[in-house]
Amino acid sequence: MSAELQDPRFTDETAAREALEAVVWPNGPVCPHCGNVDQAKIAKLTTKSARPGLRYCNECKGQFTATVGTVFERSKLPLTKWWLAMHLIGSSKKGISSHQLHRMLGISYKSTWFMMHRIREAMRTGGLAPMGGEGEIVEIDETFIGRKEGTPKAKAGFGHKNAVLSLVQRGGSVRSFHVDSTKKADIMPIIEKNIAKETHVMTDEAIQYRKLRNKFAKHDAVDHGRDEWGYTDRRSGTKINTNTIEGYYSIFKRGMKGVYQHCGEQHLHRYLSEFDFRYNNRSALGVEDWERVSKIAAGITGKRLTYRRPDEGAHA
């Protein structure tokens, strides 16, 4: 790790900027204002007053750098700090707290908190094809975390907590969603949209899953209420359990409770993106720290996250 932290991207601003440009512009600079890709009409400004990396587009007369149109846009922090933060977040299995990161980077806590949310936004994926397929197994389960704002603690059940639905393909990826509740009406549209119909799905005994066999190739369940945690199908030899998704939740909850400790309801979806990203790019799938950082960097384009004061309306 100490050798990795000496990488030029973490210590040299020019190297950090060039690395970012290579990610954002793999085929050369592109004007984010008009979409011009003609390199003959894009000039690099080298005057004393021009900041490093500044380009000028002769097509629309606009100026830009590689950070425009990314989660880095309008950030005053050095790019070396951004690269190091992406490395530390990507390589920390259960996450890293804002307080820890702000001490390591030497920047304010508020700036670090906002930086981490921007990086989580870069980790977010969308528009994915359905997971699973013929011969594949996807485990489905839900869990509860934190407290719903303004909702008193229930005498029984988890109605006062935030509900999370996760879908995990064995040996593959996970997708997690912050849902309004675990009722059938809230979770079934997500399940049907994100899992291929040819998939063998596995769940616990919850009532909302009982008719999944009508939606997918096969559905098996384990009855946790009767202390049944898994068994082997005698005909096919398939192991029926939800151990994979329980393992994912163990990492998620250790991170949320042990590292982050508190998460506002309006930010939960970004924390889920963070844990999903690391799980989907884990060492067991052949993805190591440097590749993980590169994948985070590849997700910064086309996204913006702005900061608003609490008295200015919606949260960032």
Image: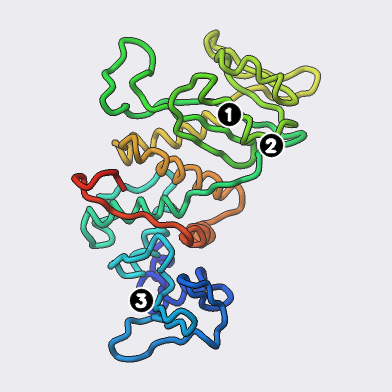
Residue carrying label 3: 13
Tell me how far mark 2 sits from mark 1, CA to CA: 16 Å
What residue type is disc 1 on?
A: Pro
* N-terminal-most mark, 3 or 1: 3
Q: In which quarter of the image is residue 1?
A: bottom left
Q: Is mark 3 on a helix, strand or loop?
A: helix
Residue 125 location, x and y as percent?
Answer: 53, 49
What residue type is disc 3 on?
A: Glu
* N-terminal-most mark, 2 or 1: 2
As drawn, the residue found furthest toward the right would be: 235
Q: Does any portion of residue 40 appear in the rendered image?
A: yes
Residue in the picture at 52% in, 28% down: 246
Mark 2 or 1: in front is 1
* Mark 1 neighbour class, 10 Å CA radius: few under 14, some 14 to 19, many 20 or more: few
* Mark 2 neighbour class, 10 Å CA radius: few under 14, some 14 to 19, many 20 or more: many
Residue carrying label 1: 189
As drawn, the residue found furthest toward the bottom would be: 47
State yes or no: discs 3 and 2 in contact (Cβ < 8 Å).
no
Residue in the picture at 35% in, 52% down: 116
Residue in the picture at 41% in, 68% down: 68
Q: In this view, does 270 lie to the left or right of 278?
A: left
Residue carrying label 2: 132
* N-terminal-most mark, 3 or 2: 3
As drawn, the residue found furthest toward the top would be: 226
Q: Is mark 1 on a helix, strand or loop?
A: helix
